[in-house]
Amino acid sequence: MVERKIEQLLLKKFEEEEYSDCYIIEILQNNIKLQIFLDSDSNMDFTKCRKISRYLEEHIDENQWLGEKYILEVSSPGDRPLKFPRQYKKNLGRTVEVLTNEEEKINGEIIEVNEEGIVVEYKVRIKEGKKKRTEMMQTPIAFDNIKKAKIRFSFSK
C-alpha cells in the first residue's frame, strides 16, 4: 500500500520539467526500509536523487506512512538488471551481458535499439587451419527473449 502511494507521488513529481525524463525502476519495502530505484533518459545523478528523497520524506513524515523510524534510500539502478527498453537506448554504445531465455550468454556492445529489441556486436575467434582470426558478429535479440541484461562496467581505457 505504501509502495502505491510512493509511486503516485513520484509520478506527480515527474510531471515537473526537471524530472520529466525520470521513471521508476523498482520500489522495495521491508519493515522499516524503503528502497526506490529511479532512472532517467538523461542523467540520474546524486542531486536529483537527494531532491526526490527530500520530497518523499516530507510526505512520509507528514502522513506517518512508515512510523517514526524508517530508512529511505533513493538511488539510480546502478548495476541492477535493465528492465525497460528506454534503459537500453540510454546505454547505446556500452557493453552489456545478456542472458537469453534459452540460457545463452552474449557479451558485447549495444549498437542498435529498436521497437523489437537490441543488436549486440561482439568479437568471435575463428580457427582457420593453424591460424585464428577475429571477426565481429552482430546478433539481434528481441526484448521478449531477454531473461536478464546488465551493463558491464569497464575501468580500462
Image (cartoon, rainbow, N blue to C red):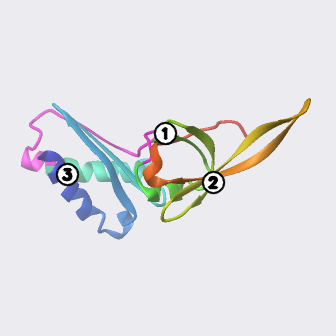
State left or right for residue 56 relative to residue 118. left
Residue at 41% from the left image edge and 46% from the top image edge: 76
Residue at 30% from the left image edge and 53% from the top image edge: 52
Which residue is identified by label 1?
102
Q: Is residue 80 above or below residue 110?
A: above
Secondary structure mainly formed by the magenta segment: loop
Q: Position of residue 9 (x, y in %)?
A: 20, 58
Q: Secondary structure at mark 1?
A: loop
Residue 54 magenta: no
Name the amino acid type tagged 2.
Answer: Gly
- The numbered mark, 3 or 1, whose residue comes first in the sequence reads 3
- The numbered mark, 1 or 2, whose residue comes first in the sequence reads 2
Could you say which disc has been placed on residue 93 in the image?
Answer: 2
Q: Which residues are magenta?
A: 60-82
State left or right for residue 147 relative to residue 152. left
Q: Comparing marks 3 and 2, which lies closer to the viewer?
A: 2
State left or right for residue 107 relative to residue 75. right
Name the amino acid type tagged 3.
Answer: Ile
Residue 68 falls in image quadrant: top left
Residue 34 falls in image quadrant: top left
> Mark 3: few, some, or many residues within 10 Å (few <14, many ≥20)?
some
Q: Position of residue 83 (x, y in %)?
A: 40, 49
Which residue is identified by label 3?
6
Residue sitting farthest toward the front: 129
Q: Nearer the viewer, residue 107 or 75?
A: 107
- The residues tagged by marks 3 and 1 sit, at their Cα atoms, a distance apart of 36 Å
Residue 44 seen in the figure? no
Q: Position of residue 11 (x, y in %)?
A: 25, 61
Residue 67 magenta: yes
